[in-house]
Image (tube, rainbow, N blue to C red):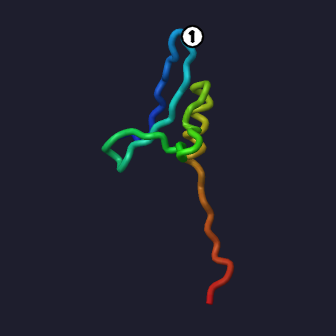
């Protein structure tokens, strides 16, 4: 089952296309915009390549955790 998807949205009557990045909620329930923080929605992209780049960056981002001090 896919975790992410990119939906193509066509704006009428201009025919302009936008791409929306969506993620599964709890793995199986419904799709939502993971980049929507309530004030700005960054899940919309103008090109498919930009949307794919953003998803790949989000999936491949590795966080490094290092303990600096402990008692």
Q: Give the residue furthest to the left.
A: 29
Classify 10 Å Cα crowding around label 1: few (below 14), some (14-19), many (20 and above). Answer: few
Please give left or right for residue 30 compared with residue 64 in the image: left
How many marks the image carries: the answer is 1
Q: Give the residue furthest to the bottom.
A: 71
Q: Give the residue furthest to the right.
A: 68
Instruction: Note whether 50 is above or below 24 in the view shown.
Output: above
Q: Give the residue furthest to the top.
A: 13
Percent from the top left, x then y, of residue 41?
56, 39
Asked whether 1 or 11 is in front, the reply is: 11
Percent from the top left, x then y, of residue 58?
57, 46
Asked whether 59 or 38 is in front, the reply is: 38
In the rendered view of the protein, which quadrant contains the C terminus?
Answer: bottom right
Asked whether 31 or 40 is in front, the reply is: 40
Q: Quadrant of residue 47?
A: top right
At x 46%, y 27%, the residue is: 7
Percent from the top left, x then y, of residue 27?
35, 47
At x 67%, y 83%, the residue is: 69
Q: Quadrant of residue 18?
A: top right
Query: Secondary structure under badge 1?
Result: loop
Name the residue tied to disc 1. Answer: 14
At x 39%, y 39%, the residue is: 31
Instruction: Note whether 71 is above or below 47 in the view shown.
Output: below
At x 52%, y 17%, the residue is: 11
In the rendered view of the protein, which quadrant contains the N terminus?
Answer: top left
């Amino acid at each position: 089952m896919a975790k992410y998807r990119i939906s193509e949205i066509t704006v009428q009557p201009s025919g302009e296309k936008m791409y929306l990045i969506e993620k599964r909620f709890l793995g199986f329930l419904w799709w939502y915009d993971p980049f929507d923080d309530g004030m700005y929605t960054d899940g919309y992209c103008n090109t498919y390549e930009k949307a794919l780049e953003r998803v790949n960056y989000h999936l491949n981002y590795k966080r490094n955790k290092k303990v600096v001090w402990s008692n």
